[in-house]
Image (spheres, rainbow, N blue to C red):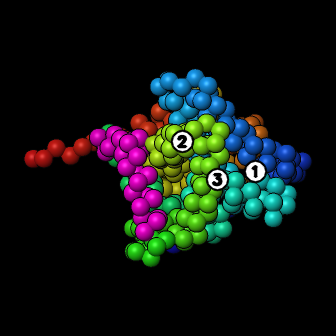
């Protein structure tokens, strides 16, 4: 099995540009965490002040996207991009990003670095997320329906909690449930969510935690997480070149607000040079555009076009 190729930064960037886009910033890294929780808090306050179906729907979408944002920032912590201090990086990455959404930083890091090493090969632990595509439109609609009705969330959490209790630890179709030891993820999840339950109940009311935290986590967050997974690696050409093992998706303001926060859409650049912090990826993309390198990369214009590719398989009509 061929290992994915590696790129030398000096072939694409000047020494000055490379040093600039690799520079870590505590202000930007920790600021993204404050930004995520700030949008979550403002969305909750909006519903508390103006409770009606429209504000609840808007809050569910905003909060669900920022819950994905917390998972994205956990991903950034796995690469050491949230702080110049490894201790600070790992603490905020675990307790302010991973734990509230049911993930675990250390185990995710081990798993994720394997994904980078073996991207789009048989050893890639994430291959199961992209290998089934393209699928039919009917199949995609079923997946979206399961996400938005909470079925995906319920299945995932039921398996995770059952494993934590020792009632059936098993590998899910060849991958170790994103390499998380269930118990290590569940206990911090329960602890941080208990804090959220108490705080939201005291500040807003008994209904705030289930409506303004669990509902977004169980619905919109599941959908945008699926969209992210599809956009990043589905329907590629099978090449092991770093410019072709992942996709960058160009996004507009609304897509960044409701689907793809914190520069997550620049996934091709991330796989080309995984040590570039996420808040420098847009600048890396601009620099790569100067000499036409972007034209050689896997780039798509928007999530709608990615979904059209991912659901382009024709249904088989029985003879």
Residue position for label 2: 206
Mark linked to residue 195: 3
Is disc 2 in contact with disc 3, using a CB cutoff of under 8 Å? no
Q: CA distance from mark 1 to mark 3?
A: 30 Å
Q: Determine the secondary structure under disc 3.
A: helix
Choose top left, top right, bottom left or bottom right for residue 155.
bottom left
Q: Earlier in the sequence, mark 2 or mark 3?
A: 3
Q: Earlier in the sequence, mark 1 or mark 3?
A: 3
Residue 194: x and y in percent read 60, 55
Which residue shows up at 64% across the image and 53% down it?
195
Choose top left, top right, bottom left or bottom right for residue 116.
bottom right
Q: CA distance from mark 2 to mark 1?
A: 39 Å
Mark linked to residue 277: 1
Tell whether position 263 is magenta.
no
Count of numbered badges drawn on the protein: 3
Q: Earlier in the sequence, mark 2 or mark 1?
A: 2
Q: Nearer the viewer, residue 60 or 25?
A: 60
Judged from this view, the residue extending furthest toward the left is 319
Q: Which residues are magenta?
A: 138-162
Which residue shows up at 54% across the image and 25% down it?
51
Instruction: Assess disc 1: are there few (<14), some (14-19) or many (≥20) residues with their C-alpha within 10 Å of its C-alpha.
Output: many
Mark linked to residue 213: none
Q: CA distance from mark 2 to mark 3?
A: 13 Å
Left or right, 74 with respect to 119, comes to right
Q: Determine the secondary structure under disc 1.
A: loop
Between circles 2 and 3, the one closer to the viewer is 2
Which residue shows up at 49% across the image and 71% down it?
164
Can residue 31 be seen at all in this image of the molecule? Answer: yes
């Amino acid at each position: 099995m061929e290992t994915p190729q590696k790129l030398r930064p000096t072939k694409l960037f000047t020494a000055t540009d490379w040093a600039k886009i690799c520079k870590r910033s505590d202000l930007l890294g920790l600021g993204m965490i404050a930004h995520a929780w700030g949008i979550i808090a403002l969305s909750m306050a909006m519903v508390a002040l103006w409770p009606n179906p429209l504000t609840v729907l808007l809050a569910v979408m905003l909060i669900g996207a920022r819950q994905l944002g917390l998972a994205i920032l956990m991903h950034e912590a796995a690469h050491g991009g949230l702080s110049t201090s490894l201790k600070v990086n790992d603490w905020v990455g675990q307790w302010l990003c991973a734990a509230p959404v049911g993930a675990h930083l250390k185990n995710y890091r081990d798993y994720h670095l394997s994904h980078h090493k073996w991207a789009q090969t048989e050893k890639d632990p994430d291959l199961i997320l992209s290998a089934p595509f393209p699928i039919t439109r009917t199949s995609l609609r079923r997946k979206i329906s399961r996400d938005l009705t909470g079925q995906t969330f319920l299945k995932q959490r039921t398996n995770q909690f059952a494993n934590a209790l020792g009632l059936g630890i098993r590998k899910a179709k060849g991958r170790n449930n994103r390499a998380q030891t269930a118990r290590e993820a569940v206990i911090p999840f329960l602890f941080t969510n208990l804090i959220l339950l108490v705080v939201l109940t005291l500040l807003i009311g008994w209904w705030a935690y289930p409506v303004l935290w669990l509902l977004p986590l169980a619905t919109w967050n599941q959908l945008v997480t699926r969209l992210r997974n599809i956009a990043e690696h589905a329907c590629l050409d099978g090449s092991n070149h770093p410019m072709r093992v992942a996709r960058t998706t160009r996004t507009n303001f609304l897509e960044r607000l409701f689907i793809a926060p914190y520069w997550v859409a620049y996934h091709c650049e991330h796989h080309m040079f995984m040590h570039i912090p996420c808040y420098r990826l847009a600048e890396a993309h601009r620099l790569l555009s100067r000499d036409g390198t972007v034209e050689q990369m896997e780039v798509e214009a928007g999530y709608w076009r990615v979904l059209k590719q991912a659901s382009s398989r024709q249904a088989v009509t029985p003879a």
